[in-house]
Image: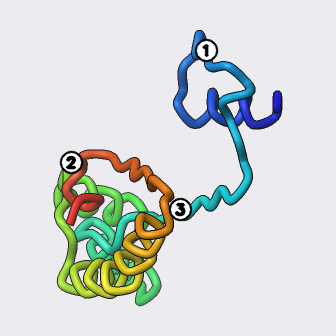
């Protein structure tokens, strides 16, 4: 249907995306969205926010600490690795069952280190 086609275009981000509407079926469609686990930048942000809460630095100083300490492509924190491991233990069996019953799951992920475990 047209709503599904519009959704597919928005997800894929293609302006001239073409697909026959009869080839799209939402029957049995399941969408699982997972945000990356905790990164080292998330930990740094928590630390900086805590310094502000305690009155140990102002917003300008906090921003400077954040900018100097952050990574462009941060890895997962220790807790983030634990979160990713927990997710894999619960998600992989669901994907395996899906394949077993004839579905073809599609996984879309970005290539940032915090999103690929």
Measuring from the top left, give residue 84's x and y in whole percent: 29, 78
Residue position marked by numbered label 1 in the rendering: 18
Q: Is residue 2 above or below residue 110?
A: above
Measuring from the top left, give residue 9's x and y in whole percent: 63, 27
Location of residue 48 by image quarter:
bottom left
Q: Earlier in the sequence, mark 3 or mark 1?
A: 1
Q: Secondary structure at mark 2?
A: loop
Measuring from the top left, give residue 54's x and y in whole percent: 41, 89
Crowd rating for badge 3 (residues with CA inside 10 Å; few <14, some 14–19, many 20+): few
Q: Secondary structure at mark 1?
A: loop
Q: Earlier in the sequence, mark 2 or mark 1?
A: 1
Q: Is residue 83 above or below residue 101?
A: below
Residue position marked by numbered label 2 in the rendering: 72
Residue position marked by numbered label 3 in the rendering: 33
* Cα separation between marks 3 and 2: 23 Å
Judged left or right of residue 13, residue 100 is left
**Residue in the picture at 45% in, 53% down:** 104
Pick the front one: 11 or 92: 92
**Residue in the picture at 31% in, 63% down:** 61
**Residue in the picture at 37% in, 65% down:** 36
Measuring from the top left, give residue 75's x and y in whole percent: 17, 64
């Amino acid at each position: 249907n047209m709503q599904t086609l519009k959704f597919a275009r928005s997800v894929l981000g293609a302006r001239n995306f073409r697909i026959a509407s009869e080839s799209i079926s939402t029957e049995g469609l399941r969408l699982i969205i997972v945000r990356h686990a905790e990164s080292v930048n998330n930990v740094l942000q928590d630390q900086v926010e805590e310094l502000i809460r305690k009155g140990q630095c102002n917003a300008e100083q906090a921003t400077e600490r954040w900018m100097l300490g952050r990574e462009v492509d941060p890895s997962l924190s220790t807790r983030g690795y634990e979160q990713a491991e927990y997710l894999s233990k619960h998600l992989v069996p669901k994907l395996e069952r899906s394949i077993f019953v004839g579905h073809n799951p599609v996984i879309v992920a970005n290539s940032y280190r915090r999103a690929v475990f």
